[in-house]
Image (cartoon, rainbow, N blue to C red):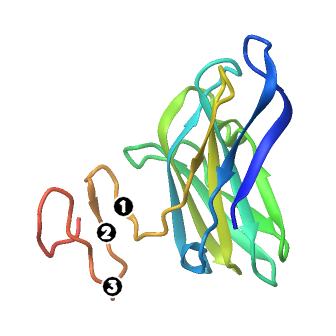
Amino acid sequence: VVSRTFVANARSASGVPGTFGFSIPAQGTGQTVSAGETAWLTYASSAPSASSGFRTNLMLLNAGTATTVASVALLRGDGTPAAATRDYTLGRASAAQQTDLGAAFGVTGPESNLRVVVTVKRGGPLLVGASLIDNAISSIAYLPPAKVDQPGDGAYGWGATPGRPAPAPAGGAGDRAC
Protein backbone atom coordinates (compact mmCIF):
# COMPACT_ATOMS: atom_id res chain seq x y z
CA VAL A 1 0.00 0.00 0.00
CA VAL A 2 1.25 3.44 -0.90
CA SER A 3 -0.30 6.68 0.29
CA ARG A 4 -0.22 10.07 -1.39
CA THR A 5 -0.74 13.32 0.45
CA PHE A 6 -1.30 16.49 -1.50
CA VAL A 7 -2.82 19.97 -1.49
CA ALA A 8 -5.49 20.30 -4.17
CA ASN A 9 -5.73 24.10 -4.17
CA ALA A 10 -2.06 24.99 -3.73
CA ARG A 11 -0.30 28.04 -5.12
CA SER A 12 3.39 28.34 -5.88
CA ALA A 13 5.52 31.08 -4.31
CA SER A 14 4.81 33.17 -7.43
CA GLY A 15 1.03 32.64 -7.10
CA VAL A 16 0.52 30.03 -9.84
CA PRO A 17 -2.34 27.66 -8.91
CA GLY A 18 -1.90 23.89 -9.02
CA THR A 19 -1.40 20.87 -6.80
CA PHE A 20 1.62 19.54 -4.99
CA GLY A 21 2.28 16.55 -2.83
CA PHE A 22 4.27 13.36 -2.52
CA SER A 23 3.87 9.62 -2.16
CA ILE A 24 4.55 7.80 1.08
CA PRO A 25 5.81 4.25 0.52
CA ALA A 26 4.44 1.37 2.54
CA GLN A 27 6.36 0.17 5.59
CA GLY A 28 6.68 -3.51 6.38
CA THR A 29 6.37 -4.90 9.88
CA GLY A 30 10.18 -4.99 10.10
CA GLN A 31 10.21 -1.19 9.85
CA THR A 32 7.74 -0.61 12.68
CA VAL A 33 9.08 0.43 16.07
CA SER A 34 7.99 -1.43 19.21
CA ALA A 35 8.71 -0.86 22.90
CA GLY A 36 12.44 -0.42 23.47
CA GLU A 37 13.24 0.09 19.76
CA THR A 38 14.42 3.25 18.01
CA ALA A 39 13.94 4.69 14.53
CA TRP A 40 16.13 7.41 13.02
CA LEU A 41 15.08 10.00 10.46
CA THR A 42 18.05 11.81 8.94
CA TYR A 43 18.49 15.10 7.10
CA ALA A 44 15.63 16.88 8.85
CA SER A 45 15.73 20.69 8.90
CA SER A 46 14.27 23.69 10.67
CA ALA A 47 14.10 27.31 9.50
CA PRO A 48 12.69 30.32 11.36
CA SER A 49 11.50 31.87 8.05
CA ALA A 50 8.26 30.75 6.41
CA SER A 51 9.62 31.79 3.00
CA SER A 52 13.13 30.32 2.95
CA GLY A 53 14.97 27.26 4.21
CA PHE A 54 13.35 23.93 5.01
CA ARG A 55 11.03 22.59 7.69
CA THR A 56 10.19 19.04 8.75
CA ASN A 57 6.81 17.54 9.62
CA LEU A 58 6.90 14.35 11.71
CA MET A 59 4.31 11.61 11.07
CA LEU A 60 3.49 8.92 13.65
CA LEU A 61 0.99 6.06 13.27
CA ASN A 62 0.21 3.71 16.13
CA ALA A 63 -0.61 0.39 14.47
CA GLY A 64 -1.16 -1.27 17.84
CA THR A 65 -4.24 -2.03 19.88
CA ALA A 66 -3.06 -0.17 22.99
CA THR A 67 -1.80 3.33 23.76
CA THR A 68 1.76 3.99 22.59
CA VAL A 69 4.20 6.46 24.14
CA ALA A 70 7.16 7.55 22.02
CA SER A 71 10.10 9.73 23.02
CA VAL A 72 11.20 12.10 20.23
CA ALA A 73 14.63 13.73 20.25
CA LEU A 74 15.97 16.27 17.78
CA LEU A 75 19.76 16.00 17.40
CA ARG A 76 22.28 17.97 15.37
CA GLY A 77 24.66 16.14 13.04
CA ASP A 78 27.32 16.07 15.76
CA GLY A 79 24.92 14.36 18.18
CA THR A 80 24.22 17.35 20.43
CA PRO A 81 20.56 18.06 21.25
CA ALA A 82 18.93 20.83 19.20
CA ALA A 83 16.08 20.90 21.74
CA ALA A 84 14.75 19.06 24.77
CA THR A 85 13.30 15.59 24.18
CA ARG A 86 9.53 15.28 24.37
CA ASP A 87 7.04 12.44 24.59
CA TYR A 88 4.10 11.85 22.25
CA THR A 89 1.16 9.66 23.31
CA LEU A 90 -1.00 8.04 20.63
CA GLY A 91 -4.21 6.14 21.26
CA ARG A 92 -4.71 2.71 19.72
CA ALA A 93 -4.87 2.68 15.92
CA SER A 94 -4.36 6.45 15.72
CA ALA A 95 -2.10 8.85 13.85
CA ALA A 96 -0.54 12.21 14.62
CA GLN A 97 1.49 14.77 12.71
CA GLN A 98 3.75 17.36 14.31
CA THR A 99 4.03 20.17 11.79
CA ASP A 100 7.18 22.31 11.69
CA LEU A 101 8.99 20.05 14.14
CA GLY A 102 11.86 22.46 14.85
CA ALA A 103 9.54 25.34 15.73
CA ALA A 104 7.35 23.03 17.84
CA PHE A 105 10.47 21.99 19.77
CA GLY A 106 11.53 25.63 20.25
CA VAL A 107 14.43 25.70 17.76
CA THR A 108 14.89 29.39 16.91
CA GLY A 109 17.71 29.40 14.36
CA PRO A 110 18.16 27.65 11.06
CA GLU A 111 19.27 24.04 11.50
CA SER A 112 20.01 21.47 8.82
CA ASN A 113 21.34 17.92 8.99
CA LEU A 114 19.15 17.23 12.01
CA ARG A 115 18.30 13.72 13.12
CA VAL A 116 14.89 12.87 14.53
CA VAL A 117 15.23 9.98 16.97
CA VAL A 118 12.00 8.18 17.91
CA THR A 119 12.14 5.61 20.72
CA VAL A 120 9.00 3.74 21.73
CA LYS A 121 8.78 3.70 25.52
CA ARG A 122 5.56 1.72 25.76
CA GLY A 123 3.23 0.07 23.26
CA GLY A 124 3.64 -0.09 19.51
CA PRO A 125 4.12 -1.03 16.84
CA LEU A 126 4.61 2.53 15.61
CA LEU A 127 5.16 3.62 12.02
CA VAL A 128 7.36 6.70 11.65
CA GLY A 129 8.18 9.04 8.78
CA ALA A 130 8.63 12.72 7.99
CA SER A 131 8.24 15.21 5.21
CA LEU A 132 10.91 17.76 4.37
CA ILE A 133 9.36 20.91 2.91
CA ASP A 134 11.13 23.68 1.01
CA ASN A 135 9.60 26.85 2.49
CA ALA A 136 10.25 28.92 -0.66
CA ILE A 137 8.55 26.68 -3.22
CA SER A 138 6.64 24.13 -1.11
CA SER A 139 8.48 21.20 -2.69
CA ILE A 140 8.14 18.11 -0.49
CA ALA A 141 10.39 15.07 0.00
CA TYR A 142 9.74 12.02 2.16
CA LEU A 143 12.21 11.10 4.92
CA PRO A 144 11.96 7.35 5.54
CA PRO A 145 12.83 5.83 8.91
CA ALA A 146 15.88 3.69 9.54
CA LYS A 147 15.42 1.27 12.40
CA VAL A 148 19.04 0.58 13.29
CA ASP A 149 21.33 0.44 16.25
CA GLN A 150 22.50 3.86 17.35
CA PRO A 151 24.90 5.50 14.89
CA GLY A 152 28.20 6.57 16.46
CA ASP A 153 27.70 10.33 16.84
CA GLY A 154 30.21 12.07 14.60
CA ALA A 155 32.33 8.93 14.30
CA TYR A 156 30.87 7.85 10.95
CA GLY A 157 30.60 4.33 12.32
CA TRP A 158 27.98 2.27 14.08
CA GLY A 159 27.35 1.12 17.63
CA ALA A 160 25.71 -2.18 18.42
CA THR A 161 23.10 -3.35 20.86
CA PRO A 162 24.61 -5.83 23.33
CA GLY A 163 24.14 -9.38 22.08
CA ARG A 164 23.85 -8.31 18.44
CA PRO A 165 26.78 -8.25 16.02
CA ALA A 166 28.16 -4.85 15.05
CA PRO A 167 28.21 -3.90 11.38
CA ALA A 168 31.65 -3.17 9.92
CA PRO A 169 32.61 0.43 10.65
CA ALA A 170 32.60 2.92 7.79
CA GLY A 171 35.88 3.15 5.96
CA GLY A 172 37.09 -0.41 6.37
CA ALA A 173 36.49 -3.93 7.51
CA GLY A 174 36.88 -5.03 11.06
CA ASP A 175 35.06 -6.34 14.07
CA ARG A 176 35.23 -3.25 16.23
CA ALA A 177 32.22 -1.11 17.10
CA CYS A 178 32.60 2.65 17.05
Residue at the image point whose x is 63% and y is 50% from the top: 130
Give above or below for 100 relative to 14: below
Circle 1: residue type: Pro
Position of residue 147 in the picture relative to residue 27 (left or right): left
Check residue 171 in the rendering and tell me which mark sits there, or answer none: none
Residue at the image point whose x is 23% and y is 64% from the top: 178
Mark 3 or mark 1, earlier in chain: 1
Instruction: Say which element carries label 2.
Output: loop
Q: Position of residue 160 (x, y in %)?
A: 32, 75
Depth check: give the residue in front, 143 or 82. 143
Q: Residue furthest top?
A: 14
Quadrant of res 68: bottom right
Label 1–label 2 contact, CB within 8 A: yes
Residue at the image point whose x is 62% and y is 80% from the top: 35
Mark 3 or mark 2, earlier in chain: 2
Mark 1 or mark 2, earlier in chain: 1
Residue bearing mark 2: 159
Instruction: Say which element carries label 1.
Output: strand
Residue bearing mark 1: 151
Cα gap from disc 1 to disc 2, whole angstroms: 6 Å
